[in-house]
Amino acid sequence: MNNKLQKQLLKRSKAAKLERLGKTVSFLALMLITVTVFAIIIFVASKGLATFFSNHVNIIDFLTGKDWNPNVTNAKGQPEVGALPMISGSFVVTILSALLATPFAIGTAIFMNEISPHRGAKLLQPVIELLVGIPSVVYGFIGLTVVVPAIRNIFGGSGFGILAGTFVLFVMILPTVTSMSVDALRSVPRYYREAALALGATQWQTIYKVVLRAATPGMLTAVVFGMARAFGEALAVQMVIGNAALLPTNLVSPASTLTSVLTTGIGNTVMGSLQNNALWSLALVLLMMSLIFNLVIRMIGRKGAMSK
Amino acid sequence: MLINPSSPRLDDGWLERNIVDPSLKSQQPIVLETQQLHVYYGDNEAIHEGDLKFPEHQISALIGPSGSGKSTYLRSLNRMNDGIARVSGEILYRGVDVNRPEIDVYEMRRRIGMVFQRPNPFSKSIYDNITFALKRRGVTDKKELDEVVETSLKQAAIWDEVKDKLTKSALALSGGQQQRLCIARAIAVKPDILLLDEPASALDPVSTSKLEETLLKLKEDYTIIIVTHNMQQAARISDYTAFFNMGRALEYDETSQIFTSPKVQLTNDYVAGDFG
Amino acid sequence: MNSKVSNQIAIATLYVIASTIVVILAALLGYIIISGLPALSWHFLTSPAKAFTAGGGIGIQLFNSFYLLILTMIISFPIALGAGIYLNEYAKQNWLTSLVRTAIEILSSLPSVVVGLFGFLVFVVQFGFGFSILSGAFALTFFNLPLLTRSIEEALAAVPDEQREGGLALGLSKWETVLHIIVPAALPTILTGVILSAGRIFGEAAALIFTAGQSAPALNFTDWNPFNISSPLNPMRPAETLAVHIWKINSEGIMPDAKAISSGASAVLVISVLGFNLLARFVGHRLFKRLTAG
Ligand SMILES: Nc1ncnc2c1ncn2[C@@H]1O[C@H](COP(=O)(O)OP(=O)(O)O)[C@@H](O)[C@H]1O
Ligand SMILES: [Mg+2]
């Protein structure tokens, strides 16, 4: 046995030490992100649940109450913290904007991938990237100076409300949903189209009956993703929706969303007070919805993978 | 000649493994040797038994059909398979078993270098490609680095082609030049053994013959183990040849023996070009 | 209806839809630039804002946006790099890795206002940083980390394994190989990702209104000692950014020229983001060429 060599080979080299250090440091960086996510969930939950555990608000009353007036105590001696106006406001603008954006997004995606790939790559791709890049306050500002006055002129009233919010969100989520739909179409194998066309189907029949069907899970994911963004968008919506904590009864009168009440309210309340806690409860609803959207996207992904 | 005592596990009686012990034939000491080497990818055993000895300053070639385990065997020798495959058995490097967790794998790999099938120069200058590992090991003296660059490039027979463009990107070189640069890079850290996995398979015939010349010169300073699918190449440059089939070294002998009078029928078929 | 006709109708409709998107973008950009350009002047870009009278600028907000961006990058890049390296180079396929990936996905889809509220709770209140650049930079770091980590991971994954083996075969550790070979090889892609995320950070407001604050105290641009309260570099001062400013003056602005200022500020914001986009393409392209050319 070669003792000198053995000794040299058993000594821990600089490389070995660096490897240990580097692996540890990069692991810690990753853990920092992970721990943060859990911290966010725990912090927001603990603040948001205080309304129910410290201030003894009934959670059902909170979710279904129609009156949001945290400074006022109602007949039962409970503060008026009914979040239904905001919750329904958030859902209505989200669903309406998704309904509006979906045909445009999918249509554009089909155009880009099936009808005119050249123009898709040269013209529409950059257009979509630019639309993604426009900051949300700019969307809000344009909504405020263009969309709201237009609605005011056509429908009367102040112009603020669900319709204005829907319109702004529609433009905001359009690029995201479109580019994800393009990805979904792209993942449909070429021979699907060739087989359908060879059977004598027209291009539209091929797209409609074969390509779209195969790409459905991916498109659904795109739409849900867009909805998640719309639900969480704060400032652009807050600037055009009017911020009245009322149950939306029509599309053109002031309403509010979870995010709009949060952004206007949190700075005007005292930490630890019921008024403040109630706002954190809204944030908790927002967080839960974000998690649910995440879950739905995962479920679609899993189903899509199974049916393939 | 020494027939390996462990009997083959194949049923076919004619398939008798013929492993020669080079230490009985060559005056050179054995620098690397495997004993009872088994390699597993998950549950799949890719090397069933690899018991070979490699003599110093000789070129040993590993040949055999594709998928027979040549690369797997070669990559196990300097533990490039760590984290990819499980390797059991002993790998004796100058008598020291390096297939143990307490061995410093980085120092071991410095001594047992490797060149791969596809040339893989770093996207750095030619000069930096050669000096990179040295700098990481703490060599800072410019004169020393310059010297290593020159000697390694000369040893790899590429100095004349690149000496005027050392600061240019290595990726701008031709495939053959890149491969010789990779050899120069490997010998810059002063290894003992060079492992090469089909180093010429991506090269044109002219580059290939240049590479072969280079290897023949390099064997004066290094022990070389080369995987090749090109039998002429093995015949031209190697001193010993091992024939691999289905995860086993079926026959191992002096190259001239393997190519003129192999003892195993399959080896004969293979070198005659009947399969593989 | 016969299938040929319906085919033509469908394709015509698709043309209309695709054109609509182009028209929407053209209208948006046109509106922003045309309504914003008249407001743009050297004075506008460099002078401080005025609360009650016309003629204010966006100088301080513009500076704040850039300072916050740089600080955020300084904090988030090393973390994202480490996390990206671990995910691509070391992580095994096990429950911990899938937990981590889920967490990153959740963080990336979290509404930025929630991230801002968390930043408010932790940095502004708990750590006592108050409304400050530092609080804002931390909030933006969380906002930035998931996407940046993912783009770094993808950039590293695109570097062929042969490069890694090349380093390992020389007796280098995986860490050294990754840091000195793989990361430099992936640099064009990594930089493109960094610049694109910079555009996102630059336009972000919701995560900032409760962390960096909504006020822009006067700065003394001759004092570069970060410990002085009026120094532009002081990280503990409140710092309204350009994006927050646009939101703020439109929600409760009382200066008479609020609209002109917002138009100008929006134009600056959009032009900056466009600039980041172009820069990203340019840098990726140029660096790639420099690394591969002879
Ligand atoms: N990374 C790997 N993972 C799983 N199996 C592998 C891997 N590499 C090689 N194998 C398997 O091991 C066997 C031997 O392969 P290899 O050593 O590459 O053969 P050769 O180099 O002789 O062509 C083959 O069956 C191959 O499929
Ligand atoms: Mg091989």
Image (spheres, coloured by chain):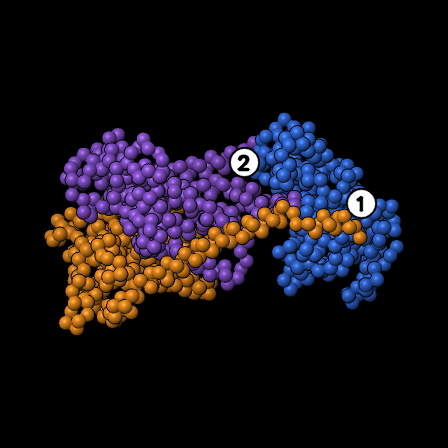
Q: Say which amino acid is labelled 1.
A: Glu
Q: Which chain is purple?
A: C
Residue A287 coordinates in the image, percent (x, y): 33, 60
Q: Say which amino acid is labelled 2.
A: Thr
Question: What chain is tagged by disc 1?
Answer: B
Q: Which chain is blue?
A: B
Question: What chain is tagged by disc 2?
Answer: C
Which residue is at a point 87% across and 57% down the rendered structure image? Answer: B2
Question: Mark 1 or 2, which is nearer the eye?
Answer: 1
Disc 1 to disc 2, C-alpha distance = 39 Å
Which residue is at a point 44% across and 36% down the rendered structure image? Answer: C283
Circle on res. B56: 1
Residues marked 1 and 2 touching at CB (< 8 Å)? no
Circle on res. C64: none
Q: Which chain is orange?
A: A
Dot 1 and dot 2 within a common chain: no
Residue B52 shown left or right of residue C97 in the figure: right
